Image (cartoon, rainbow, N blue to C red):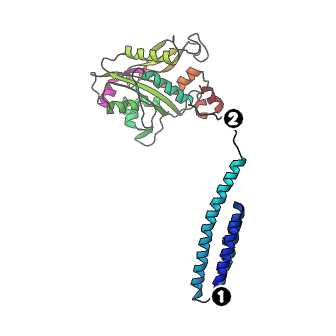
Amino acid sequence: MSFTKISEIQVEAEKSFRAAQNSQELYDQKVKFLGKNGIFTELMKHMATLSKEEKPQFGQAVNIAKKILETLYEDIESQIKNKEIQERMLIESVDFTLPSTSIEMGHPHPVQKVTEEIVQILARLGYSLRLGPLIEKDRYNFEALNIPKDHPARDMQDTFFVDKEHVLRTHTSPIQIHSLEGETPPLRILGTGSVFRCDSDISHLPHFHQIEGMCVDRNVSMADLKGTISFFVQEFFGSGLKTRFRPSFFPFTEPSAEVDCSCPICKGKGCSLCKNSGWIEIGGAGLINPHVFKFSGVNYPHWQGFAFGFGIERMAIIKYGIPDIRLFPENDLRFLRQFVK
């Protein structure tokens, strides 16, 4: 087979490529000449009949012809595709006067919605937000909060242990310790995020959310704490609601109190949510225990402070009358759509 045959096939392929009217015809010609079973592949099989001197020259000639055709194919393909696009644009049209398809936008989860509202209310009193790690050292989750290893208060919180020294935080109070150690008073901070406890029923989840506030300043008293809570309750649940403090115990505050407010649903008259008592518990509070200040290296009694905390899901349940805390993590759209506004 002569080298002239290669040139003839190349010329024939070039004519075929240029004669193609659309992308499919062009592709078919590429397969015919350059494909796995195409003409050039068959041509290479004849190398066995050539002499040792002719084989390299023949192979080189075939490769040069194929490269020329491949370059030509790419150029013609680009031209045909551009032409097809232009033709399609002339045929097809978009009516911009037609109404668009309605797309449902995402919106905050009720937990996020309530968190943001609480932060916005307390920011007006000078509080700013802090975050902390979900996996805490025992030192920050318990010991720095006046809960040593043998303290019975540890039984109040069913803890997920990561190892001997680390736990999934059982409350957001460790954020207070990080702030006391890393910042200089006076302080007004909020700490929020996920917390974890081995508990699950109609009113408890193993993973839920808390928000805590801490004020450290000079001459801080229970009166300041009560005023802060009272302001928050009326801003969050509505004006006219009352608050009350019941004596309680928390290792990190002294004195400590459970905080109630008159039921936002029935306005204190009595309903199923407040179990006909007219009052509903919203969280815990108290003056910061001197041992917490000592552990964190804060000069007490030069500085005093108070702290308070709420469960985010509980606040949402009270505010919106949600019957079961387990609705929050299920992410059922029928439930979530109620909180779009």
Q: Secondary structure at mark 1?
A: helix
In this rendering, the label closer to the viewer, 1 or 2: 2
Which of the labelled discs sits on residue 183, or is there none?
Answer: none
Return the residue at label 2: 97
Residue 99 among magenta residues: no
**Residues packed near mark 2 inside 10 Å, few (<14), some (14 to 19) or many (20 plus):** few
**Residues packed near mark 1 inside 10 Å, few (<14), some (14 to 19) or many (20 plus):** few
For residue 317, side relative to residue 306 (left or right):
right
Q: In the image shown, does 59 or 286 lie closer to the viewer?
A: 59
Q: In the image, residue 248 lies at what x, y percent?
A: 43, 19
Q: Are marks 1 and 2 in contact (CB under 8 Å)?
A: no
Residue under the image location 60 percent in, 82 percent down: 58
Extent of the magenta region: 285-298
For residue 322, side relative to residue 285 (left or right):
right
Q: In the image, residue 21 lies at what x, y percent?
A: 72, 62
Residue under the image location 64 percent in, 59 percent down: 79
Return the residue at label 1: 49
Q: In the image, residue 126 lies at what x, y percent?
A: 39, 22
**Above or below 303: residue 60:** below
Three-letter code, disc 2: Thr
Residue 84: in sight, yes or no? yes
Q: In the image, residue 219 lies at what x, y percent?
A: 31, 17
In the rendered image, the quadrant that contains the C terminus is: top right
In the rendered image, the quadrant that contains the N terminus is: bottom right
Q: In the image shown, does 144 or 53 lie closer to the viewer?
A: 53
Residue 36: in sight, yes or no? no
For residue 209, side relative to residue 225 (left or right):
right
Three-letter code, disc 1: Thr
Q: In the image shown, does 90 or 81 lie closer to the viewer?
A: 90
Residue under the image location 60 percent in, 26 percent down: 339
